[in-house]
Image (cartoon, helix red, strand yellow):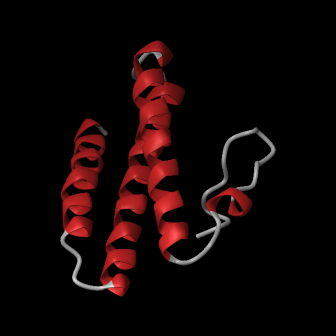
């Protein structure tokens, strides 16, 4: 699992670099979508580490918070470039976490 979080976490940076080099709006949106998928996968692995007891929750909390903040930033960018309002698109799920999957 450690290798998985390393792969997805470093993939975010590499794919974001590709986003910055996009040649068209469609390419920008597609590449940004990959970034969103990779950061979401990273959040998943961090949640799994904490929930399984592999790492103490206190060790994962800050990383997870930062990953979720980056996810929110990238999703907002994605919505903005698609011409949607990030503020009106986000919905709270039952557990008070942002539900990104329902808007993508």
Give the x, y percent position of residue 79. 55, 68
Give the x, y percent position of residue 98. 66, 47
Give the x, y percent position of residue 65. 49, 31
Closer to the camera in the image, 85 or 35: 85
Give the x, y percent position of residue 16. 26, 59
What residue lies at 67% left-to-right and 65% top-to-bottom? 102
Say left or right for 68 vs 39.
right
To which quarter of the image does residue 91 belong?
Answer: bottom right
Q: How many marks?
A: 0
In the image as oriented, which residue stretches furthest toward the right? 94
In the rendered view, would you say 13 is above or below 97? below
Closer to the camera in the image, 93 or 78: 78
Closer to the camera in the image, 59 or 24: 24
Name the quarter where the C terminus is drawn: bottom right
Name the quarter where the N terminus is drawn: top left
To which quarter of the image does residue 51 belong?
Answer: top right
What residue lies at 47% left-to-right and 51% top-to-bottom? 73
What residue lies at 44% left-to-right and 56% top-to-bottom? 74
What residue lies at 39% left-to-right and 28% top-to-bottom? 63
Say left or right for 85 vs 51.
right
In the rendered view, would you say 98 is above or below 88? above
């Amino acid at each position: 699992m450690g290798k998985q979080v390393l792969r997805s976490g470093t993939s975010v940076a590499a794919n974001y670099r590709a986003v910055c080099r996009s040649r068209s709006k469609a390419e920008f949106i597609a590449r940004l979508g990959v970034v969103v998928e990779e950061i979401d996968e990273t959040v998943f692995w961090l949640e799994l580490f904490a929930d399984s007891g592999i790492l103490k929750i206190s060790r994962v909390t800050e990383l997870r918070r930062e990953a979720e903040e980056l996810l929110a930033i990238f999703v907002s960018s994605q919505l903005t470039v698609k011409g949607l309002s990030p503020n009106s698109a986000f919905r709270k799920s039952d557990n008070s976490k942002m539900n990104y999957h329902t808007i993508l």
